[in-house]
Image (cartoon, helix red, strand yellow):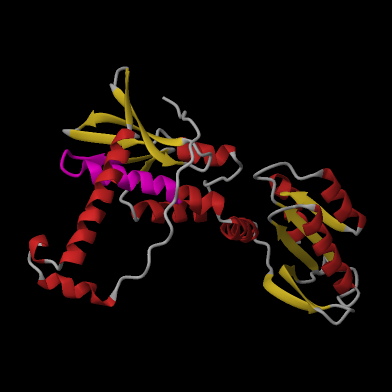
Amino acid sequence: MGHSGAAAALLKPDRPPTTPHGLHGLLQYRSAAELPHGVAAMTSELQSLMDRYFAWLKDRTSLRPLGGVDDWTEITTPYLDRHNDYIQLYLRRWNGGYLLSDDGFTIRDLEQSGCKVNTQKRQQLLRATLAGFGVQQRQDALEVHASAQNFPMQKHNLIQAILAVNDLFYMAVPMVASLFFEDVTDWLDLSNIRYTPDVSFTGKSGFNHHFQFVIPKSTHQPERVVEAITRPTKGEAENFIFRWEDTKEARQLNSKAYAILNDQASQVPQPVIDALASYEVRAVPWAERELLREELAA
């Protein structure tokens, strides 16, 4: 099984207006026949729109038997993923009901894009998100078990979970930054590296500069400033260099600076590492972080 689909553009409706205050008053009417004429006409129009939506949903959903030992069926839905491809699900009979699965596509696609979800904190976030939709994770696959009675709701829940996981881990840049910061924090803790988080120093310019981690001076090493750079670009490197250069003369003698660079999505550009090194900042990609363990723990 695999994932394929054609790109498609869907019109997204504008956000609806807030609910009229008088809407609850309509509950006094026991049937549509008792509604005022204008309201009855609007209700009929909305029902027509809903019928058209359900017809569109039915027409844009296709089934393709895959056969095989487990007799899977591929369901192509009208909902789009972040690649603008149709989301596809896979269905087979199971234990007197049905098993619906994404065949592991959602998580594999995120990981192939550089967004790893295998750390403890990311797994906790993933489980909490899936639990909100009643969806289970088995290895990489997201799946639900359904009966004939609750099949529509379970299928809907799985689709919404797939969209939520994509949004949670890939689309929200602040979330990605937060997760990388947590990865670095966890590594420092597991490595028994003592540090003070979120420290601000005043530079020679008079400006205050914030640093993520400061490791105090020891008998073997001077004070060390450590920054986790989520997006290691030229601009981010220049920003850290400026903060460090403005600050280091006011710090303890021989203070050092380190930059841990996020290379989970793509390789860190060599010019970024070279630029940091030219200002005596020890820059190490996340994949090579173990090179710093002894130096920071001393």
The residue lying furthest to the bottom in this view is 206
Could you say which is closer to the camera, residue 24 or residue 121?
A: 24
> Residue 145: where, in percent of width, then height?
25, 40
- As rendered, which of 81 and 59 lies closer to the eye? 59
Q: Could you say which quadrant of the image residue 257 lies in? A: bottom right
Residue at 35%, 34% (x, y): give it: 60
Residue at position x 34%, y 44% in the image: 158
Q: Is residue 233 left or right of residue 176?
A: right
**The residue stretch that appears in magenta:** 144-164
- Image quarter (top left, top right, bottom left or bottom right) of the N terminus: top left
Q: Is residue 156 magenta?
A: yes
Residue 132, position as x, y percentages in the image: 34, 56
User: Where does the image place residue 100, in percent across and percent down from the top left?
Assistant: 30, 36
Is residue 222 in view?
Answer: no
Residue 249's spot in the image, x, y percent? 91, 74
Q: Is residue 257 visible in this depiction of the protein?
A: yes
In magenta segment, residue 53: no
Image: 84 above or below 173: above
217 and 167: which is toward the camera: 167
Position of the C terminus, as image quadrant, is bottom right
Residue at 14% x, 70% y: name it.
Answer: 27
Is 65 above or below relative to 164? above
Would you say the magenta stretch is mainly helix, strand or loop?
helix
**Is 81 situated left or right of 248 in this image?**
left
Answer above or below: position of 27 versus 268: below
Residue sitting farthest toward the front: 37
